[in-house]
Image (cartoon, rainbow, N blue to C red):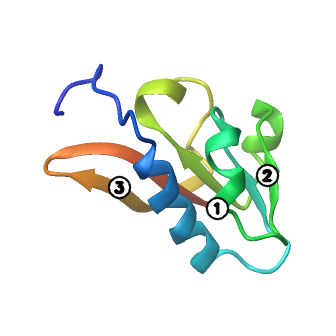
Amino acid sequence: AYDYDELDRSWLSFREATEVVNHLAEPNAVVGVPTQTNQIEPFLRPDLKLVSEIAEVESADLVISCLWSSQGDWHTRDFELVYAVHRGEAVFAEVWRHR
C-alpha cells in the first residue's frame, strides 16, 4: 500500500481521522471533507458541522483529506497538517487545521 492507487477499502483511515477531529475540534467547529462525507458522518461528534463543497472546505476549521481521492480538489495553503493516518509508510488520510 505504498502507491498513489492503493485504496483503504474498509475506510478505517477516515474513521481514525474522524476520531482525531472529534478530539481536536472546538465546539460547533466546521469540518471539511472534499469527498466521501457518508464515511465521516456516522463517527463525527453531533455538534460539528460537516461540509463538502470546495469553497466551504477551504474555510473549514479542520479538514479530513483522503489523499488518493481528493488530490487537487482543495488547497492546503491556509492549513497546517496536524495528523496523518499511516499504515507502514503509506498515508491513507490526513487531518488539516486552518491557521
Q: Which amino acid does label 2 sit on?
A: Leu
Q: On the image, numbered disc 2 is attached to which residue? A: 50
Q: At 58% across and 54% down in the image, what residue appears? A: 79
Q: On the image, numbered disc 3 is attached to which residue? A: 85
Q: Quadrant of the C terminus?
A: bottom right
Q: In this view, does 11 lie to the left or right of 87?
A: right
Q: On the image, numbered disc 1 is attached to which residue? A: 43
Q: At 63% across and 73% down in the image, what residue appears? A: 22
How far apart, in angstroms, are the residues tagged by discs 1 and 2? 11 Å
Q: Which amino acid does label 1 sit on?
A: Phe
Q: Is mark 3 on a helix, strand or loop?
A: strand
Measured from the top left, where is residue 66 in percent x and y? 48, 38
Q: In this view, does 33 lie above or below 95?
A: above
Of residues 17 and 15, the one drawn nearer to the viewer in this rendering: 15
Measured from the top left, where is residue 30 in percent x and y? 80, 60
Q: Which amino acid does label 3 sit on?
A: Val
Whether residue 58 can be seen here: yes
Q: Quadrant of residue 85?
A: bottom left
Q: Which of marks 3 and 2 is nearer the N terminus?
A: 2
Q: Do the residues labelled 1 and 2 touch (CB within 8 Å)?
A: no
Measured from the top left, where is residue 56 in percent x and y? 82, 42
Q: In this view, does 66 lie to the left or right of 58?
A: left
Q: In this view, does 74 lie above or below 12?
A: above
Measured from the top left, where is residue 5 in percent x and y? 29, 19
Of residues 78 and 27, the one drawn nearer to the viewer in this rendering: 27
Q: In which quarter of the image is the N terminus?
A: top left
Q: Which of marks 1 and 2 is nearer the N terminus?
A: 1
